[in-house]
Amino acid sequence: MNELTQERNRIHASIVKSAFQFHQIASDMNELTQVRSLIRASIVKSAFQLHHIASDMNELTQERSRIHASIVKRALAALQIARFMKELTHPRISMHVSIVKRVLRN
């Protein structure tokens, strides 16, 4: 009977030990899952930050393009004004030449 009791105690101990091992494995798996979730959250957060930086850079590029376009428009406007001034100057020069010719003839 004593041997049977000891055997039964060993079986119970083995069952308790197995249950504890399963609990430990489950705890370790839970911890790994939490770490994996933190890593995924970190990856998503990093990707979002990169997207935000890219968006900011895109805005800056668009603003720079608008500034360049404004500079080009101003330069073209100045060129157009210079052309108009040149066109206005030609008739005036012709008038001056005509006046000078008349004065010299008289």
Image (cartoon, helix red, strand yellow):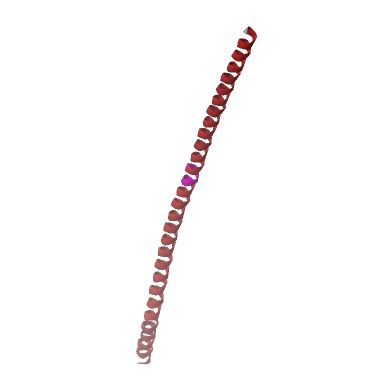
Q: Residue at x 55, y 24 (%)?
A: 24
From the viewer's side, name the closer residue of 100 and 58.
58
From the viewer's side, name the closer residue of 28 and 52.
28
Q: Which residue is drawn at 40% across and 74% down?
A: 80
| Residue 19 percent coordinates (x, y) | 56, 23
Task: Give the residue at the far front of this rendering.
Answer: 1
Task: Give the residue at the far bottom of this rendering.
Answer: 106
Task: Give the residue at the far right of this rendering.
Answer: 3
Q: Horizontally, is 49 left or right of 24 in the view?
A: left
| Residue 5 percent coordinates (x, y) | 60, 10
Q: Which residue is drawn at 46% across and 48% down?
A: 53
State the image quarter where residue 11 is shown.
top right
On screen, 8 above or below 28?
Answer: above
On screen, 10 above or below 56?
Answer: above
| Residue 104 percent coordinates (x, y) | 37, 89
| Residue 89 percent coordinates (x, y) | 38, 79
From the viewer's side, name the closer residue of 97 and 62.
62
Q: In which quarter of the image is the C terminus?
A: bottom left
Q: In which quarter of the image is the N terminus?
A: top right
Question: Which stretch did the figure color magenta?
Answer: 45-49
Dominant secondary-structure state across the stretch colored magenta: helix
On screen, 48 above or below 76?
Answer: above
In magenta segment, residue 85: no
On screen, 32 above or below 7?
Answer: below
State the image quarter where residue 18 is shown.
top right
Query: How many numbered circles does the render carry?
Result: 0
Q: Residue at x 47, y 42 (%)?
A: 45
